[in-house]
Amino acid sequence: MLAWALVVLPRTAQSLTAPKFSTVVGAPGAPYTALARLLDLGLTTALVGWCLLAVVLRLRSLPRERHATLLLLLLPWAYLVVRDLYLGVLPGRETLIYPLVVVGLWSLRPRLEDLRSLGGLVAVTALIAVGLGVLAPEAGIDRLASGEAAAADKAIFSSGILVGPFTSGNNLGQVLVLGLPWLGMVRGRALRAAGVAVVLLALAWSASRSSLAGAGAVAALAMALAVLPRWCRPVAAGVALAVAATIVAALPLVVRDDTSFTNRGLIWRGSLDAWRGAQWTGLGSRWYSDVAGTTSSIAGSAFHGHNQVVQVLVTGGLVGLSLAALMGGVLLVRAARWTGRGRTVPALHLIALAVSSALEVSFGLVDRTFLLATALVPVVVVALAGQATSDDSDAAPTSTPRTLAGLAPRFAPAAATTARAPGPAATKSTSSAAPARARPRDDPGSGQATSTAS
């Protein structure tokens, strides 16, 4: 909830209280208004405080598992920060959010069910975007400073490209497509259908082609997993994710025309030419923002690599790409295992992430804060979450209410982990509120607090 609020609320306030129009790459955008700045500062402080509090209050009962996974999640970030420090770039606020969220969620032993609210929040984001497009088109539709619709030749609807509270249709599309699979965990068929409908409407209006392709990949994989025998679903999910990742990596290498994919061919060629000057270590996370202020041939088109592999390779080199590949391998294995247990949402989320990353950068280590709620938080939970019951389905209700009131028991570990009275009476007293349920060793906690960070 905090991560979603940090992404959406300040941007919505900014859209409603300041002029909004497209600018060329490298040109400064409009500064946050007083209201947007206040919301941004307050919500950032709340998120950072929540992460620190989660760790501090559980210092005596931190998880004894998933240490290797935690390390693999942190290593790509740590390398990029060290590389930036060597170049004289100090870490900023966005840089520090990544490790705080990762470690904070790890300390709480998250469960997949803790992301049940994410689908609803994504539907609310789509409603806000559509509402801005209809009621305040000057804030919700992409326009030039002259007032004309931007990129009119790309728009699907005659009204223009929907940006909602964000600054481009591609950004809105990324947020929505990454949250689309989590609508499958929303309780109630009617609510799920309504949420999917409004998200698909906003996606089409955003004209984000990579995000629309991601939505198509989600639908195709979901249908395939639904008809395949259960025993082969994990293999199918793993193969689909591996193929998608391979396409993302190969696309910039096989495209030869600079005008391909709306001049992305030019961006990829210029980026890879620059990378060859620092193949192993990369050029640092600030390279794209620095080159945007120069007379480089790609300065007018690139504010990032427009491909996840190109972005990682240029900023972190082969070392950074290797660390990112290890992290991706862990996520692939975890998603396949979840699929084998009847939970397809992790695989659907990762296929959306992979396909949308072919033409955009859908995951960031030191930037891309607008994807905090729909990219970073789900990835961390998928990687670290304990297993659910063997026959749990994506939309099945849990045996314990997942409410914000669950914060209190999660921050009082002594009652659940240290107080063990001998004899059967103690066991009965702890399970009087609900039937006892066997829990695998990699799921020792209840994970009720994690939903606050979604």
Image: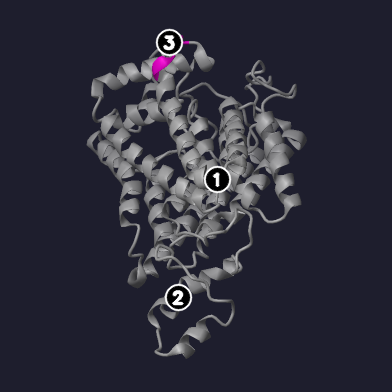
Q: Which residue is found at the position 52% from the left and 60% from the top?
A: 390
Which one is closest to the eye, mark 1 or mark 2?
Answer: 2
- Amino acid of disc 2: Ala
Residue 136 makes an appearance in the image? yes
Q: Contact (CB < 8 A) between labels 1 and 3?
A: no
**Label 2 belongs to which residue?**
412
In this view, the residue in front, 189 or 239, is: 239
Identify the residue shown where x is 63% and y is 32%: 163
Crowding near pointer 3: few (<14 within 10 Å), some, many (20+)? few
Q: CA distance from mark 1 to mark 2?
A: 29 Å
Residue nearest the observer in this picture, 340 or 45: 340
- Which amino acid type is shown beneath numbered disc 3? Arg
User: Helix, strand, or loop for circle 1?
Assistant: helix
Depth check: give the residue in front, 407 or 91: 407
Stretch of the chain drawn in magenta? 253-258
Query: Which circle, 3 or 2, is nearer the viewer?
Result: 3
Label 1 neighbourhood size at 10 Å, few (<14), some (14-19), many (20+)?
Answer: many
The residue type indicated by label 1 comes to: Val
Find the distance from the CA under tag 1 to the CA under tag 3: 36 Å
Question: Where in the figure is residue 256, as x and y percent of width and height?
Answer: 43, 10
The reply to whether the magenta stretch includes residue 37 is no
Q: Secondary structure at mark 3?
A: loop
In the rendered image, which residue does mark 3 sit on? 256
Q: Position of residue 177 (x, y in %)?
A: 59, 37
Q: Viewer-nearest of labels 1 and 3?
A: 3
Per the image, the residue denoted by label 1 is 7
**Above or below, comparing residue 357 to residue 196 in the picture:** above
Say whether disc 1 or disc 3 marks the residue closer to the N-terminus: 1
Left/right of residue 346 with respect to residue 92 in the rendered view: right
